[in-house]
Amino acid sequence: MTLRILFVCTGNSCRSQMAEAFCRALGKDVECASAGAEPSAEIQPDTIAVMKETGIDISGARPRGFPDLPDLRFDWLVTMGHDVVGPLLPGAREVKWEVPNT
């Protein structure tokens, strides 16, 4: 069974983009996506640089909001920050990661 995970932060320009990229690179039998409650205009350049250092290229990624997701059926909702509110996902388990927005 494939698990579906949605990572959510405020701007979808750093934390959730990194989590999605690591999930895609390391996850097996997992589908993942990320989105922001208030999407930024672009991915933070430092985020792209740090991910490149790990061997993962996210230079083609773009911030997304909840309406940009084609399907809101997820098994897990991972919010990343104390002030982050994710979309209502019936049946999804929610995990709150307290990752500072720096």
Image (tube, helix red, strand yellow):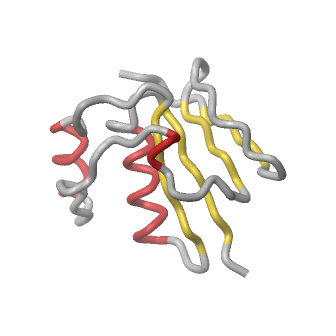
> Residue 74 vs residue 81: left or right?
right
> Residue 21 vs residue 8: left or right?
left
Residue in view at x 49 percent, y 33 percent? 9
Observer-nearest of 91 and 101: 91
Residue 63, image quadrant: top left
Q: Position of residue 38 (x, y in %)?
A: 43, 25
Q: Is residue 89 above or below residue 71?
A: above
> Which quadrant is home to the N terminus?
bottom right
Observer-nearest of 2 and 47: 2
Residue 57, image quadrant: bottom left
Residue in view at x 63 percent, y 44 percent? 78
Residue 14, image quadrant: top left
Observer-nearest of 67 and 90: 67
> Residue 51 vs residue 85: left or right?
left
> Which quadrant is home to the C terminus?
top left
Q: Position of residue 71 (x, y in %)?
A: 59, 58
Residue in view at x 50 percent, y 42 percent? 67
Q: Position of residue 75 (x, y in %)?
A: 73, 59
Q: Is residue 74 above or below residue 9?
A: below
